[in-house]
Image: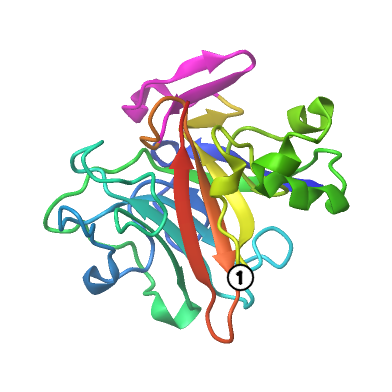
């Protein structure tokens, strides 16, 4: 199956953002203070993890101009259940193009911590060799365990859109009833080119690539993005697992 891997650059190495684009972390593009998600446990503003724009192949949100945003509470890590889908400590929101403004959101008054901001310069198209007819087996433990080990090992383990999830814990945690896997977020960012030392973010080598810490998903965690299409605007679902 085809999947898409982001070619990231830290925003500190780039000119200021002037338009809507795919990115990880930072402040969301286009939100008003009233649209910002609030944690239902602590009552504070959530932090942006990712903002992705509709693409008919890479991220099909059903309509051009729609944008998906993923947030989680980061005021007191571990205190609010950010790992649990639908609990109210994270949010996966989809907006129409005309619901967004033409500028970066302002920082909320309660000052949520910002994840390092990295913009996606391009999406690299990859192929994992998983046949579409085998994809359904990846969403329940009983069927996943029956797949050949070699097939399971081909699943890309870091941030991507498309294909099937790389589960850390139970595959049966995937939502049913029409929900479709759209992509996953890693606990770390991976860069093809070394960011500058002036970025203020600790960068570490990863073989021929480089990395930095990203969202707080526990110990080496992965976050999972699902979307369910409806008669109107689709809805999103997000949760994460860790080792």
Q: Is 135 drawn above or below residue 60 in the view shown?
A: above
Q: Is residue 163 rendered to the left or right of residue 209?
A: right
Considering only vertical position in the picture, is 162 above or below 187?
below
Give the x, y percent position of residue 240. Answer: 46, 42
In the rendered view, does 122 fall on the left or right side of 108?
right
Q: Secondary structure at mark 1?
A: loop
Q: Which residues are magenta?
A: 194-214
Q: Is residue 211 above or below residue 45?
A: above
How far across and down, in percent of the image, does residue 7 sit? 61, 39
Q: Is residue 33 positioned above or below 140 on the image?
A: below
Residue for badge 1: 61
* In the image, residue 196 lies in the stretch drawn in magenta: yes
Rendered image coloring scheme: rainbow
- Let me know if residue 192 is in the magenta part: no
Residue placed most toward the observer, 103 or 83 = 83
User: Residue at the spot x=34%, y=40% of the render?
Assistant: 115
> Can the viewer see residue 229?
yes
Q: Can residue 20 be seen at all in this image of the molecule?
A: no
Q: Quadrant of residue 45 in the image?
A: bottom left
The residue depicted at 56 percent of the width and 29 percent of the height is: 191
Q: Residue furthest front?
A: 142
Q: Residues within 10 Å of mark 1 (few under 14, many from 20)?
A: many
């Amino acid at each position: 199956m085809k999947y898409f891997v982001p070619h990231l650059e830290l925003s500190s190495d780039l000119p200021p953002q002037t338009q809507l684009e795919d990115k990880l972390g930072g402040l969301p593009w286009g939100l008003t203070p009233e649209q910002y998600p609030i944690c239902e446990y602590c009552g504070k503003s959530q932090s942006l993890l990712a903002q992705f724009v509709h693409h008919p192949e890479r991220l099909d949100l059903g309509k051009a101009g729609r944008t998906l945003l993923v947030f989680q509470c980061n005021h007191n890590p571990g205190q609010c259940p950010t790992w649990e889908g639908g609990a109210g400590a994270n949010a996966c929101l989809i907006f129409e193009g005309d619901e967004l403004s033409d500028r970066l959101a302002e920082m909320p008054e309660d000052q949520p911590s910002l994840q390092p901001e990295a913009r996606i310069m391009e999406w690299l198209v990859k192929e994992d060799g998983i046949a579409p007819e085998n994809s359904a087996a990846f969403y329940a433990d009983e069927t996943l365990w029956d797949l050949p080990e070699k097939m399971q090992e081909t699943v890309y383990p870091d941030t991507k859109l498309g294909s099937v999830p790389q589960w850390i814990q139970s595959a049966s945690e995937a939502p049913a009833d029409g929900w479709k896997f759209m992509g996953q977020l890693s606990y770390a960012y991976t860069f093809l080119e070394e960011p500058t030392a002036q970025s203020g973010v600790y960068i570490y080598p990863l073989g021929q690539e480089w990395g930095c810490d990203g969202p707080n998903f526990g110990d080496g965690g992965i976050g999972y993005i699902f979307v369910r299409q409806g008669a109107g605007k689709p809805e999103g679902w997000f949760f994460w697992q860790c080792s």
